[in-house]
Amino acid sequence: MGEVLSLQEQGESAREFIEGLIEELGLEASVSVREVDSETIEVVVDGAELGLLVGRGGATLGALQELARTVVQSRTAGPTERILVDVAGYRAKRAEALQRFTKQVAEEVVASGSEQAMEPMLAPDRKVVHDTVGDIDGVQTRSEGEEPRRYVVLSPEGALVTSDSDD
């Protein structure tokens, strides 16, 4: 473990790791770093044919992000800030699609008065669901299950719920 790294230095460390991985995989991509806020850095990978880095349902992307975070943790003596990784705009596209789907499910919950469970998903996707439903009257959410099979349940507002939500 070395010195305490600033947010920008942590981003650069993550970028270097991801660039090296891309090179080892024989892929062509550009890698940049942007500061999202005072505690979050995002490493952005752009290029063609990067599906290998995203994987099914973003699973490989999630693993890549976790690896980058672990590498940065090993290089700094201080706390690690939040490090996000996005490949070819996948996260934004995924969030938009998930928001549309969540709105449809919420409409069904309101119309039927019955709760609906969504498929298991990663924490960032669960957050999109919770945030989307937070803007819809008549519906509430809770997370259930254990990782990696944790999922969100949408229920009519005011319904009796037992929650183990930590998302």
Image: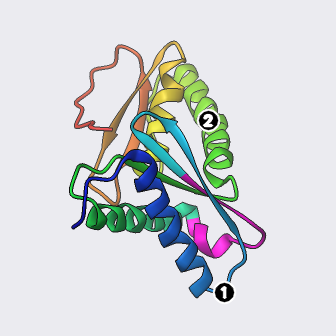
Give the image location of residue 57, x and y in percent. Answer: 56, 61
> For numbered disc 2, what is the local secondary structure?
helix
Which mark is first along the chain, 1 or 2?
Answer: 1
Proximity of marks 2 and 1: CB atoms separated by less than 8 Å: no
In the rendered structure, the answer to whether residue 1 lies left or right of residue 85 reads: left
Circle 1 Cα neighbour tier, 10 Å, few/some/many (<14 / 14–19 / ≥20): few
User: Can residue 75 be spotted in the picture?
Assistant: yes
Give the image location of residue 33, x and y in percent. Answer: 57, 52
In the rendered structure, the answer to whether residue 144 lies left or right of residue 134 reads: left
Instruction: State which region is magenta.
Output: 43-56
Q: According to the image, label 1 marks what residue?
A: 26
Image point (68%, 52%), residue name: 89
In the rendered structure, the answer to whether residue 50 lies left or right of residue 12 reads: right
| Frontmost residue, 118 versus 76 | 76
Q: Is residue 99 above or below residue 156?
A: below
Which part of the image, by quadrant, shows the N terminus?
bottom left
Image point (54%, 28%), residue name: 132
Residues at marks 2 and 1, CA–CA distance in whole angstroms = 34 Å
| Frontmost residue, 127 versus 49 | 49
| Frontmost residue, 157 versus 35 | 35
**Residue type at tag 2:** Gln
> For numbered disc 1, what is the local secondary structure?
loop
Give the image location of residue 154, x and y in percent. Answer: 44, 31
**Residue type at tag 1:** Gly
Q: Is residue 48 above or below residue 58?
A: below
Image point (34%, 46%), residue name: 81
Which part of the image, by quadrant, shows the C terminus?
top left
User: Can residue 121 be spotted in the picture?
Assistant: no
Q: According to the image, label 2 marks what residue?
A: 99
